[in-house]
Image (cartoon, rainbow, N blue to C red):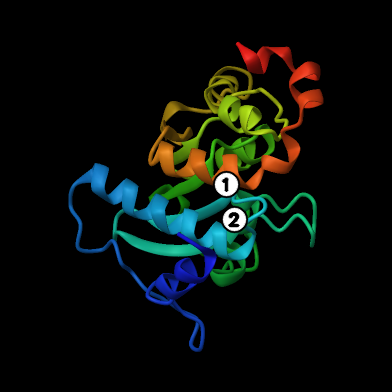
Amino acid sequence: MNIASFAIGFLHFINTATATIMQPCQNLSNMIAIDECYMKIALDYALIHNPKFPFGALIVDHTKNEISCYGANSNTKNKLLHGETSAFWNCTEMYPSPTGNDMTDPGLDWSHQTLYTTGEPCPMCASQSVYRGVARIVWGTSIPDINKSGREQITIRMDDVIQSAKLGANIPNRRVPVVEGSVLKDECDFAFWCAFASFRDEQYYIENPVLNA
């Protein structure tokens, strides 16, 4: 499917004239179907906003089955604005603290939020997810598979960050996100494989022999 058709379909998800967030997954009740529905939206959003780096993210209030906000990789604007970071930033702007103190009195109940992201969060975004306090994280393509697509990643896995948070930071289990991986894996893998084709030259695999394993 080309980018134009993605864009047409995405008009059903968000009304840009009024900035009203549509809720296309709200009638679903099966958890697998819900996860796949939101991951598809995150992927479509990424392919529209930054098809060369299709890292897209959604933050969803799972108690209401409603999208709270979107995010996409914005590396040309700010190299640190990964998809997840953009989503967290957008949510904080859309739902400001009523007292002006986001640390102690955020405008959004983050314990009710699930983060959907097309790629397994890097260590930076994984740590933000823990500190922000989301209840659940759902990702599509793994860090090793993003590596194989041609774009080098820091190979610290999401589960390692979670384990470190439980042990090193002494964060109670109830405050550490539950993680679900490989949702819509084939679709997300394909998006990264196509997007990163220009990075996959012979030298890349010579310098990274583990990718041939």
Residue 135, position as x, y percentages in the image: 42, 42
Q: Residue at x 58, y 66 (%)?
A: 97
Pick whichever of labels 1 and 2 is earlier in the sequence.
2
Q: Quadrant of the N terminus?
A: bottom left
Residue behind mark 1: 132
Residue behind mark 2: 88
Q: Residue at x 65, y 28 (%)?
A: 147
The reply to whether callout 1 and callout 2 are in contact (CB within 8 Å) is yes
The front one of 23 and 183 is 183
Left or right of residue 113, residue 208 in this image: right
Q: Quadrant of the C terminus?
A: top right
Q: Residue at x 65, y 51 (%)?
A: 85
Residue 172, position as x, y percentages in the image: 48, 27
The front one of 185 and 117 is 185
Left or right of residue 195, residue 180 in this image: left
Asked whether the viewer can see residue 136, the reply is: no
